[in-house]
Amino acid sequence: MPAIVEELFQGRTETVADKSTAEIQYLVTGAADEAEVKVAVIDGTPEYYGEMSRKAIEITERLNENSWKVTVRYETPEYNNEEEPEPTFSFDTGGGTQHITQSLLTVGKYPNDAPDLGGAIGFDGENVNGVDIVQPVMNFSETHWLKPAKMTSAYKKGIANITGTMNDGTFRDYDPGEVLFLGASGTRRGKDADSLWEVSYKFAVSPNRANFTVGDITVQQKYGWDYMWIRYANKIDNAKKSLIKRPVAVYVERVYKISEFSALGIGS
């Protein structure tokens, strides 16, 4: 049967001047030794008391074979900004791949009187098969060190909620729709309750496009992370007396939601 941790009736004591420390008394029953007591107290007491974090666990008295009196001490962490690690930044421009069915420009066709397909790629007489190409995508990450008080459940849920979304406003000098938030990972190192969290945020960038042509069609705007697809229709090449495919419609689809990246708390 697991040990039971209960707060004692005499309640809590705080420093009156600045409320920077607090001590809370607990009774632990059903624990055979000090190691089991400490495990039970860590699991059974809050990590934070207001703005203060749990700093120390002191066994003050053993009442009987399996009952213990424990004092948990909370303190407001003190930080020296000069000693905190600076944020780190990294990036790569390895790009990503995308399957396309339309070229930017047909630079040659041979023989010269070959049918004009309007930029359609890989037409086999029935389908426009397309090709996989490398797209201009830049990935970058930032590592920040955060105080434990900021790493609340609400903050972690906020990060999760905007993962896989595009930036609503300008972010790191990129226009709205160009940055995709890929998520974050965090690690806290050190034994102290006020040890900083090391959190890495990952992003990808794809440039916006505006006023470009697909065949004879002008596309006014496409966010970097919108998905564009093209509908082709049959057309008769009278000169060759053959059936070809030409683009007749372009669709720009919004496949990622848009979010305010201010929820990350790392600036814009």
Image (cartoon, grey):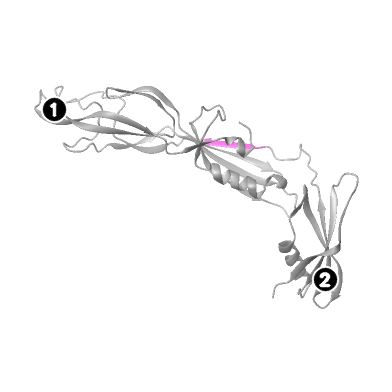
Left/right of residue 128 with respect to residue 261 in the rendered view: left
Residue 236's disc is 1
Asked if the residue at tag 1 contacts the one at tag 2, i.e. Cβ–Cβ closer than 8 Å, the answer is no
Is 90 covered by the magenta stretch?
yes
Q: Is residue 121 above or below residue 43?
A: above
Q: Is residue 10 above or below residue 265?
A: below
Residue 78: % across, % down: 80, 44
Q: Residue 100 occupies which quadrant of the picture?
A: top left
Placement of the C terminus among the 4 image quadrants: top right
Left/right of residue 100 with respect to residue 151 in the rendered view: left
The residue segment tinted magenta is: 87-91
Left/right of residue 204 with respect to residue 110 in the rendered view: right
Element type at mark 1? strand
Q: Which kind of residue does numbered mark 1 sit on?
A: Ile
Element type at mark 2? strand
Residue 113: % across, % down: 14, 22
Placement of the N terminus among the 4 image quadrants: bottom right
* Residue position for label 2: 68
Which residue in the rendered view is the most extreme toward the left?
A: 241
Kindly report the secondary structure that dominates the magenta region of the rendered protein: strand
Residue 137: % across, % down: 45, 34
Q: Is residue 18 above or below residue 213?
A: below
